[in-house]
Amino acid sequence: MSARALERPRRDVDPGLVHHIEAPATRPAVAGGEARLRELATALAQAVEDPNFRLPLLPDTAAEALQLANDPQTPMNRLERVVARDAALAARMFAVATSPAYAGSGLRSLTAALQRLGAGTIRDILYQAVMECHVFRGNDRAMRNEREHAIAVGAIARALCGEIGFDPQYAFLSGLMHDLGRTALLTLRDRPPVDGVGDDELEPLAVMVHAGLGARLAARWKLPALVCEGVRRHHRYRGFEADGGGYSQLGHVLALADTMARRLGAGRRAIAAVEDHDRIAFELGVDPARALELATAAARG
């Protein structure tokens, strides 16, 4: 792509897909520097706008299950029937429901699991099972790390919502989805314009595009608007012009949950003092020490 194309991107490119580049100290050096990264990010943004470009999609059953789970009025027996049509999803959901984290030992069927656990917990289990079966697929290290980090951020976000009195309905789901764009980028590595991108470029490219790309996927999966907003705004929760400025409280919660998960080493290299952690916590109305206490307990399940 020419420098002129980079300076004058197509007007139909979603400006929210291309984010800022973090400070050099937080990312590896890249041959070609920032201009090269912006060229890749703009090319990806334009490719995603093409009607022929196919983003990763959920299987029909999993997508239907997520949509039903998002509706508090959905009867559990209907949700169970949909989940039962996806053998991998049903098995994973039952395994999670019967794990010590959910005190579900002794259950012998999915029906029994649904009957014992509350509706809110069932939805969280379903969200996690969908992600583990159909998004974080494979056992390679990168996917395992993404899965571990996502689950930790979801659990921490839910705990933080309880602390500040914010409706936690979509906190766990938003935490699971917050870095969805990173996972999508991994699945797109063999397709242009991402094919040929080296490991030294992939991480800083993900820093630039993952929030916008993840929000686009969440919208394609027909997830609630609040979830899409949280995914898009989990790094720019205040005054982000591409989202009309203003403030996203869910984005703020996710930003703090993300920093806490990184501090604890959940799916990422542990960082003793994450930059801006104290500021993010204080601005949310949570003492940083209390945030760490909540995060540690939530991440342990």
Image (cartoon, grey):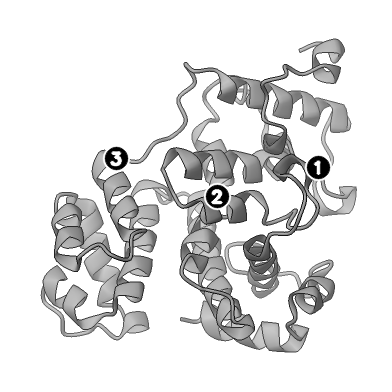
- Residue 31 location, x and y as percent? 84, 30
Q: Which of these two is toward me, 64 or 136?
A: 64
Residue at mark 3 to residue at mark 2: CA–CA distance? 19 Å
Camera-side mark, 1 or 2: 2
Q: Residues within 10 Å of mark 1 (few under 14, many from 20)?
A: few
Residue in front for this viewpoint, 57 or 189: 57
Residue annotated with mark 1? 20
Alpha-carbon neighbours of circle 3 within 10 Å: few (<14), some, or many (≥20)?
Answer: few
Q: Give the residue type at disc 1.
A: His
What element does badge 2 sit on? helix
Kind of element beneath mark 3: loop
Q: Nearer the viewer, residue 25 or 235?
A: 235
Q: Residue at x 57, y 25 (%)?
A: 48
Which residue is located at x 54 percent, y 56 percent? 226
Instruction: Tell me the kind of residue under disc 3.
Output: Pro
The quarter holding residue 6 reads top right
Q: Quadrant of the N terminus?
A: top right
Q: Which mark is residue 228?
A: 2
